[in-house]
């Protein structure tokens, strides 16, 4: 009876061994991909904040911070308006601010061409309008997330097939 025997030349065993070692190389790949996305997402957020440019302080305050323990990157603006988070004010707006400061609002209004005291009175009576940027930032980062995933998959494939971890 004719018989065809197919035997592994050791490649499949090596791939299996490399996959068994995944707990040692997978966290490295995850960290690398997450660290890679941070600066790109920060630039995208800066671009979204540029739509509401005043002094540039909010744009310049965007940071990406990687936390090793959780393998998480956090992207956020850190600027303050007095004791208030400037990013939250821009994203969500405010209610009426009864003690709205005259001088900063006057400076803002002169740059934007808004009438004084009209702008100041509106902020006192109505508040600051929301100018959301977070959702738009997430949409803008989608292609970078896809690229990070592609890179991570390539690194995982190299690790599984060849035992190469970078």
Image: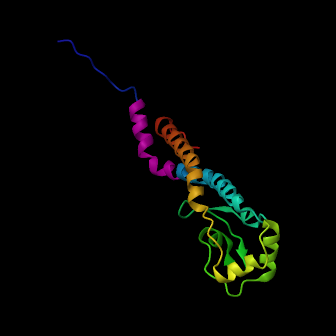
- Magenta stretch encompasses residue 25: yes
Q: Is residue 45 above or below residue 111?
A: above
**Residue at the left extreme, as displayed:** 1
Q: Residue at x 21, y 12 (%)?
A: 2
Q: Nearer the viewer, residue 55 or 106?
A: 106
Q: Is residue 56 above or below residue 86?
A: above
Q: Nearer the viewer, residue 114 or 137?
A: 114
From the viewer's perspective, tell me whether residue 112 is left or right of residue 126.
right
Residue 147: x %, y % from top left: 56, 43
Residue 127: x %, y % from top left: 64, 78
Q: Residue at x 81, y 76 (%)?
A: 106
Residue 132: x %, y % from top left: 60, 64
Q: Quadrant of the C terminus?
A: top right
From the viewer's perspective, tell me whether residue 14 is left or right of residue 109.
left
**Residue 107: quarter of image:** bottom right
The boundaries of the magenta stretch are 11-27
- Magenta stretch encompasses residue 98: no
Q: Residue at x 49, y 49 (%)?
A: 26
Q: Is residue 87 above or below residue 72?
A: below
Q: Quadrant of the N terminus?
A: top left
Q: Residue at x 42, y 43 (%)?
A: 19
């Amino acid at each position: 009876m004719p018989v065809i025997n197919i035997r592994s030349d050791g490649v499949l065993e090596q791939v299996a061994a490399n996959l068994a070692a995944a707990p040692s190389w997978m966290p490295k790949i995850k960290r690398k991909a997450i660290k890679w996305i941070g600066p790109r997402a920060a630039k995208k957020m800066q671009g979204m904040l540029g739509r509401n440019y005043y002094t540039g302080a909010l744009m310049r305050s965007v940071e990406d911070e990687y936390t090793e323990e959780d393998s998480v990157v956090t992207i956020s603006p850190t600027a303050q308006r007095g004791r208030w988070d400037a990013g939250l004010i821009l994203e969500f707006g405010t209610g009426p601010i009864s003690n709205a400061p005259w001088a900063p609002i006057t400076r803002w209004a002169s740059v934007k061409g808004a009438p004084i005291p009209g702008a100041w009175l509106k902020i006192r009576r109505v508040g600051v309008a929301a100018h959301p940027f977070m959702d738009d930032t997430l949409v803008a980062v989608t292609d970078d997330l896809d690229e990070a995933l592609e890179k991570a998959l390539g690194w995982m494939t190299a690790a599984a097939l060849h035992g190469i971890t970078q």
